[in-house]
Image (cartoon, grey):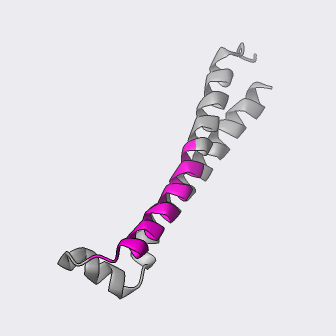
Amino acid sequence: MKYLCEFMSESWAAVAAVLWFVSASIRLKKPNRIRQGLESGFDDPKAILVMVYKQSRWSAWAAIAAGLAAVFAITDGLLPGTR
């Protein structure tokens, strides 16, 4: 059981890292029009809101995965050690 908790903790931590990477890469994939608008100060509010929504959605899933990793790590720490 302890090994299962350790495995699940490390697996969910890896999933969280991948999801945060996807969240961070969303802004880089946007068309030049949005990036140029962000750099010049002339923004397209709808496009920016859509980009923020997509980033937030991936970040939320990453936070859930990180939470699951923490729960399994805590459980692993509370279980008695194996000999």
State the image quarter where residue 18 is shown.
bottom right
Give the image location of residue 45, x and y in percent.
Answer: 36, 72
Which residue is nearer to you in this view: 15 or 48?
Answer: 48
Q: Quadrant of the C terminus?
A: top right
Magenta stretch, residue numbers = 43-63
The question of residue 25 being in magenta is answered with: no
Horizontal side of 10 relative to 47 (left or right) equals right
Q: Is residue 19 depicted above or below 39 in this figure?
A: above
Viewer-proximal residue among 66 and 80: 66
| Magenta segment main secondary structure | helix
Identity of the residue drawn at 75% across and 25% down: 2
Q: How many marks?
A: 0
Residue 4 point in image, percent of width and height: 77, 33
In the image, taking residue 5 as reference, residue 64 lies left or right, namely left
Residue 14 location in percent, x, y?
A: 59, 50
Residue 81 sits above or below residue 59 on the image: above
- From the viewer's side, name the closer residue of 8 and 62: 62
Where, by quadrant of the figure, is residue 19 drawn?
A: bottom right
Looking at the image, which residue is at 68% across and 22% down? Answer: 75
Q: Residue furthest right?
A: 1
Q: State the residue at coordinates (71%, 38%).
A: 7
Above or below residue 71? Residue 8 is below
47 is within the stretch colored magenta: yes
Q: Residue furthest left?
A: 40
| Residue 33 horizontal/vertical position (percent) | 34, 86
Please report the residue visible at 55 percent of the width from the left and 49 percent of the height from the top.
60
